[in-house]
Amino acid sequence: MNIPVFGLGTFRLQNEVVIDSVRNALDLGYRVIDTAQIYENEAEIGTAISQSGINREELFITTKIWIANLSKEKLIPSLRESLEKLKTSYVNLTLIHWPSPNDEVSVAEYMAELIKAKELGLTRQIGVSNFTIALMQNAIDAVGAENIATNQIELSPYLQNKQVVEFAQRHNISITSYMTLAYGKALQDEVIKNIATRHNATSAQVILAWAMQSGYAVIPSSTKRENLASNLLAQQLRLSEKDMAEIANLDCSGRLVSPEGLAPDWD
């Protein structure tokens, strides 16, 4: 399993805004793009990619199956529709975006469909998102840990999700962090600002470097070209053990994403 550590997130970006963001990112050297069916921007992303002229094999594209499409009748047809919008014959990674509320569709059913999608060549790898330890165990029981590339979870200096991370890592399932900057809240943190000053870096670079040094993939988004360029540089920043320890101490279980009717019972 090979999940690139740095990519572009596209949550909440639509229409011309997402086209510009993807276009700028690709121009700056990004090659990993994360989207989802519910973001309603797959078609625009497909347009930006096709206009870029970049070879498909150079790109790593992730999409996520929405809860309305988790049943065995709907999952693969919905993925084919996503591919059509993205103007590609395959994605590199397909995730279950959220577990089925109240287990309406069993984990075993939709994980089996993801495996089928992989066998059909519609996706190179499969994984999950917003899965708790119990749900990850169900997914492992269904298809084997070796088939689950990643669990994409909310993870920031304020929500370090250690139990979920440790369980995933024990099963060689990589962690992809979303909301890594805590909706921008962590950028104002004095501890992070001080570390940034020590390194002549931005707060965003420090947080992204912390996540990558912790072993997580990150997918920050931005609509500004200068921020996209700046975020890329986080890959070159090395934090000291002292820096890492200071950020570790910021954990306060500060969860920001827990939609009613959608969120599982968090660990």
Image (cartoon, rainbow, N blue to C red):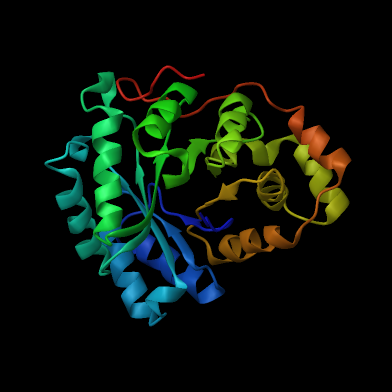
Q: Is residue 41 in sight in this rendering?
A: no
- The residue at 16%/39% (across/down) is 72
- Residue 28, located in which quarter of the rendered image? bottom right
Residue 78 is situated, as x and y percent measured from the top left of the image, at: 18, 50
Against 228, is 135 above or below? above
* Residue 38 in the image: above or below residue 79: above
Q: Is residue 222 above or below residue 159?
A: below
Q: Quadrant of residue 50?
A: bottom left
| Image location of residue 5, percent across then percent down | 59, 55
Task: Look at 34% across and 71% down and name the residue there.
Answer: 48
Task: Provide residue 221's location: percent of width, then percent of height.
Answer: 50, 53
Q: Is residue 201 visible?
A: yes
Please name whichever residue, 230 or 88, is drawn nearer the observer in this view of the structure.
Answer: 88
Check the image and name the residue furthest to the left. 73
The x, y position of residue 29, in whole percent, is 55, 73
Does residue 232 appear left or right of residue 75 in this picture? right
Residue at screen point 27% across, 40% down: 112
Task: Choose between 190 and 259: the one closer to the eye.
Answer: 259
> Observer-nearest residue: 162 or 171?
171
